[in-house]
Amino acid sequence: MTDGTTARARHGAAALTGLVLGLLALGPGLARGFLLSYDMVAVPRQPLTALTFGLTGTLPRHVPSDAFVAALSAVLPGDLVQKALLLAVFVLGCAGAAALVPTRRALPRLAAGVCYVWNPYVAERLVLGHWALLLGYAALPWAVAAASTEGTRRVVRALVPAAIGGFAAMAVAGLPAVAVAACAPGDRKRRARAVAGAVAVVAALSLPWLVTGWLRPSGVPGAPSAVDAFAPRADTPFGALGSLLLTGGAWNAEVVPQGYGTGVPVFCWALLVLVSLAAFAARMRRTDRPAWAFGLSAAAVAGFGAAAFGVVAAPALKRLIEVWSGFAVLRDGQQYTAPLVLVIAVGAGLAADALVRLVRPRERDAPAGGVAVMVAVMVAVLPVVLLPSLALGAGGRLRPVEYPDGWDTAREIVRTDPVPGDVVVLPWATYRSYPWNGGRTSLDALPRYLDRRVVTRDAVVVGSTTVPAEDPVARRLDPVVAGGGPLVPALRAAGVRYVALDAETGPDAPWRARLAGAEPVLPGPALALYRIPDPARPDEARAPLVPTVMSWIVMVSLIAWSFVTRGTTVTRHISRIPRRGRAP
Amino acid sequence: MRTAIAAIAGTLLALAAAVSVVHYTNASQESPVIKPLYNYGSR
């Protein structure tokens, strides 16, 4: 085989391994139906609305990921789109991390790939439903590799999944790419050019959410009170910082993989992490370290620092948010440890490589070669062995469900009504534990299910802390809806056409008594819909349309430009690794 | 030496697998926690 064919075969093996791990992790979740878990909501056919593009008053956290899903779900069933995106995280992540390990041996590289997609970070974020963030996580190794070489097009291509994911995805993939460009070897002029290119690419690919976020009429709310709610927490005996180092520590206790964080396995996992970090550090001290090594290390340290900030300096972070609400992005800091996870994964690959070198036979045809293979396989499967609760739909937490009867009818009623007006969802909260979803927590699905502006109270409750609502329409309606009086006059004046009840829908539900004057058009039981006659015209201040359209044009044009070239592989760096010894 | 390393690694892996699966099985049999209906999560 030629070098190129060999390289492709290796990437193929890593991608296949990622696919197998994805299939194993999702397990029964791959059956037909929709996975609704915390922030992950999939619907049969997501409409393209003003909300999709971040033009309403809500913060554009779902931009442009929702638009991507809506576009795909126009040609494919929504549940298949969801599963394909989740599997892509495993395939891209595994192949990317494997490609970064500076060895020609396949198994140590697979060990890195397995470690990168099978760890507490992935498990916790997967259950939290942060698939868009995980797209950026999967793009990170590719972005690191691309940023260490000259070539803006490669950086753009590598960051496409992060661009789809939006803010969080770009933060975990784009910023490390800038760090890698800044620390790449070469003269100052070359580095400056690389940094400028990387910054320009990250900024251009971020425009759709940057523009709508900055030009949002109601500004960016900070809510310092949420610092404690979303700070990393200890999910191991090693405290919050130790848990972050072990790639876990997400704020929500409910998403910790079952059985993780206690007993012997967590000590074994800690040992694996420490050995991996030591292997990476040892490689850093060699002169033939990869060009991206310093940049990735700097990103890992910075990411860990950002995550730790909410733990060790919560009052300072609150103060910073009071000064400028943009610092609120540091509240859920655990997500920024993605570069550290990549360092650990590459370190695991390097450790496996060192172990293989230790046990491999010196003679080419010696029969003991099988021992080296066996040792490498053992290291590769160790993350799966130590974290079995990620398997089979994250231990049963990801189970597909179908929307109950009535949801489709409601969508058709709303879609075919020529009278404009918003939809208000009751009960007045944005998270649900639908009985038909096994009581699992999920974001209310109606804002993505209906093709109108849907208003939910987007204040979130974490334990005993309530993080205030961000949507200005929800804030304006809050005194009325949260009070006990009749709803229809106030909702009519606010431009609300429909009220949807998708929980507490029984005939004696207190909400129904407050809807006197509204016409029941769908009785329930899974979803009840009321129509309010003659609503006022909705008057919501929105992000301006022209800059938003321009931002999309720039982003799409940049991506198109990056692919209009020969040789679109983002793994060219692998073929440059000098051949040393025999691969197991 | 190589065989010894392989044997030790294999034994450790088997032990880790056994302990890990038993641990996971025990954890999954704990009583479910009743969660508030509209909460995002808990700490």
Image (cartoon, coloured by chain):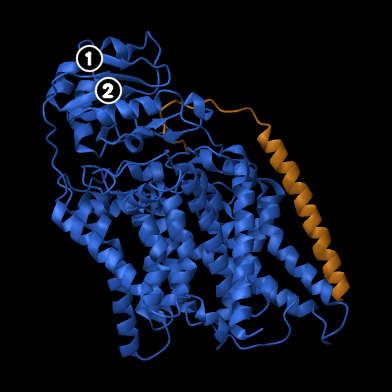
The part of the image, by quadrant, that contains residue A114 is: bottom right
Q: Is residue A441 above or below residue A270?
A: above
Number of numbered discs: 2
Chain under numbered label 2: A
Q: Residue at x 29, y 64 (%)?
A: A556
Q: Type of residue at label 2?
A: Val
Report the residue marked by disc 2.
A499
Quadrant, the N terminus of chain A: bottom right
Chain appearing in blue on the rendered image? A
Q: Is residue A355 above or below residue A521?
A: below
Report the residue marked by disc 1.
A518
Residue A250 showing in the rendered view: no
- Judged from the image, the secondary structure of the residue bearing numbered disc 2 is strand
First reached walking from the N terminus: tag 1 or tag 2: 2
- Residue B31: x, y in percent? 63, 27
Q: Is residue A455 above or below residue A353?
A: above
- Residue B26: x, y in percent? 71, 36
- Residue A344: x, y in percent? 57, 66
Give chain B's shade: orange
Residue A453 horizontal side relative to residue A65, left or right: left
- Judged from the image, the secondary structure of the residue bearing numbered disc 1 is loop
